[in-house]
Image (spheres, coloured by chain):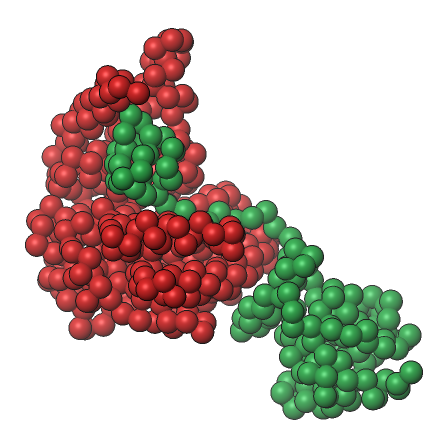
Chain colours: A green, B red
Amino acid sequence: MKSNHQTKPRARKQGLVVQALPDETLVYDLDRDRAHCLNQTASLVWGRCDGRTTTKEIAHALTKSMKQPVNEQIVWLALDQLDRNHLLSEESFIPKTVAGMNRREVVRALGLTAAIAIPAVVSIVAPLPAQAATCLGQGQPCSSSPQCCSNLCSGGFCNSP
Amino acid sequence: MSVRASNAALISRVLSGSWRSNANPAIAVSIRELDAVTPLVYDSGAAGLGWWRIRDTALAQTPSGELLHQAFRFLALQARIHETRIQRVLVSLRTAGIEPILIKGWSIARLYPQPGLRPYGDIDLLVRPEEHLAAARIAAADEFRDCLIDFHPGAFEVADRSIDDLLSRSQLVQCGDEEVRVLGNEDHFALLAIHLLKHGAWRPLWLCDLGLLLESMSSEFDWELCLGKNSCRSNWILSAVGLAHALLNASINDETISGRANAPAWLVASVLKNWEAPFAAAQAPHRHRAPIKSYFRRPRGFISDLTRRWPDPILATISANGTFGRRRRIRYQIQNCVQRAARLGLRDIQPA
């Protein structure tokens, strides 16, 4: 087994829809039909999981981009969460001091004050919001022609042109 | 007309200027008011914009704020999924030599400051009438089962312009790896303004679209081209501009237009009335309980359902090719009823 320092995690690419936003990254898992939200720290870690960069190098890169010292354990915590949510392509080796610990325990273990946000990957759960469908399809009830996609309301129903 | 404007007034306050990148004007809504308005903006498709308005305020931390945030995230992901679908559809159509114009949906959503603010479901494509059948055949393929594609061989909203003119003024814009043909700015505005009115302006999001376009248009924008040569349609477009200004505080930069863009009081009141329940199910014809013919056999409930069928004054004006003036709408509403009754009668006497 490789040591932790030699682990080069790789982000999963297939079967995902990714939408980057200014403060977070949204990921939709097409295989599992689940949506996730990665906070900024988790996004930065995930973005550097290219299969060539070690966890130590990722921590260095984060330190640079966040202008705050970033402990390697933070990277491991992010990897743990990414792995649990099937966002890494290979099994990562999660140190026992991080795996299974909740965020509060990790914060305590790391002795963090609030220098950077603890990496978080959370599921997006909400009833499906309405979309903006407009004209009425064929066979749907109507009261005037302009309401129908076909522009033909006949006998109270939209007909084909 | 009695108008219970509380819900509508709240929607107006929450969505006022919601298309802007900055938080201007500052939102003045209490937590209780946000709780009341959230289901309305959520179910009318404006949840993303609702979130955008409150994102930098203490309201964002409330349960309603969190719900709007989650909706925004969902819609942002859906926007990305829709983009890939649009690209797939366009590649197939172009392979068959069909060059459609994408209207509504993505073509307006792309102009908002963030993906997910302006949701859409259908892929509406304007095609030449002679290409309609071939395009529909391509879209019926299994690979497009996940796409809601509507082909329009013409559109009521731009019926005063030829497809050749629309194509000549259209523009290509980038959607992922593909270029997408969309309407020219003037035609686009005309289409969205009339589309809003032909549906009774019940969805607040449609008025936000106009606010966005009004405030982002360049000095090159040709209003005369947008308004067209048909005086009735030009009145519709100007009335929609007046509505966006009156209800959502949209700025009109062109002085000539701001002087002409007036929404009569009855029109503003009608839209506010529709915003009291801004859901498709609450609007005609979905609010009808049963097809009118069913009452011929079982007349029970006919009278109460008949009152539900009294036409919305905005829809009646559009269906009668009327203008949005100050006069009462009763003549258009009666005309609409007569037209509908005649259509129903004609259908009955036609041989099967």
Residue B252 seen anywhere in this rendered image of the structure: no
From this view, report whether residue B63 is shown above or below residue B183: above
Residue A82 in the image: state x and y as whole percent.
74, 70
Q: Residue at x 13, y 27 (%)?
A: B331
In the shown orientation, is residue A92 left or right of residue B223? Answer: right
Quarter of image, res B289: top left
Residue B28 in the image: state x and y as whole percent.
43, 55
From this view, report whether residue B88 is shown above or below residue B337: below
Check the picture and name the quadrant holding the N terminus of chain A: bottom right
From this view, report whether residue B164 is shown above or below residue A133: below
From this view, report whether residue B197 is shown above or below residue B118: above
Tally the numbered discs.
0
Q: Residue at x 55, y 71 (%)?
A: A20
Check the picture and name the quadrant holding the C terminus of chain A: top left
Residue B2 in the image: state x and y as whole percent.
29, 29
In the shown orientation, is residue B232 left or right of residue B33? Answer: left
Q: Residue at x 29, y 25 (%)?
A: A155
In the shown orientation, is residue B280 left or right of residue A127? Answer: left
Residue A127 in the image: state x and y as whole percent.
59, 47
Q: Residue at x 56, y 57 (%)?
A: B74
Quarter of image, res B332: top left
* Viewer-nearest residue: A83 or B118: A83
Quarter of image, res B61: bottom right
In the shown orientation, is residue B84 left or right of residue B192? Answer: right
Residue B156 seen anywhere in this rendered image of the structure: yes
* Viewer-nearest residue: A84 or A10: A10
